[in-house]
Amino acid sequence: QVQLVESGGGLVQPGGSLRLSCAASGGSFDSYSIAWFRQAPGKEREFVAASRWFGGTAYNGDSVKDRFTISRDNAKNTVYLQANSLKPEDTAVYYCAACISCISRKLESYNYWGQGTQVTVSS
């Protein structure tokens, strides 16, 4: 059983930056792929980025390309999402999720979810 806790959300002005963290406990962290999803009010939860267990990464190119960077620190059991040049449309609850050795952008592939952290981009 893996527990995930997100942190780092908040209110930021357009063009600003935030670093979200996803701390994991339980299980073997280096065998998990960890992804970030987000859900804006009235919209479906969407894939943002993923850190694969073997070291690869993936991004939702349409919405976060060249602005967001995902990284992981296996020694700290933590995955980070550096979000730069934030836009009002990035406003959402950001969730991290884990799956064992999977390569997927689909919600249903992820077995474990955190509670989410709110990101609000507004002037």
Image (cartoon, rainbow, N blue to C red):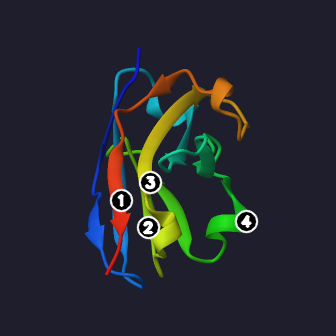
Marks 2 and 3: in contact by CB < 8 Å?
no
Label 3 is placed on what type of residue?
Ala
Marks 4 and 2: in contact by CB < 8 Å?
no
Q: Looking at the picture, does residue 1 appear above or below residue 21?
A: above
Q: Looking at the picture, does residue 98 appear above or below residue 52?
A: above
Marks 1 and 2: in contact by CB < 8 Å?
no
User: Any mark on residue 92, and which?
Assistant: 3
| Residue that appears at 43% across and 48% down | 94
Mark 3 / mark 1, whichever is N-terminal: 3
Picture quarter with the C terminus: bottom left
Label 2 is placed on what type of residue?
Gln
User: Any mark on residue 61, and which?
Assistant: 4
Q: Nearer the viewer, mark 3 or mark 4?
A: 3
Residue 24, x across and y down, in percent = 35, 34
Mark 3 / mark 4, whichever is N-terminal: 4
Q: Nearer the viewer, mark 2 or mark 4?
A: 4
Q: Looking at the picture, does residue 61 appear above or below residue 54?
A: below
Left/right placement of residue 66 relative to residue 23 reads right
Marks 1 and 3: in contact by CB < 8 Å?
yes
Q: Nearer the viewer, mark 2 or mark 1?
A: 1
Structural crowding at the residue carrying mark 2, measured as other residues with C-alpha within 10 Å and reported as few (<14), some (14–19) or many (≥20): some
Residue at image mark 1: 119
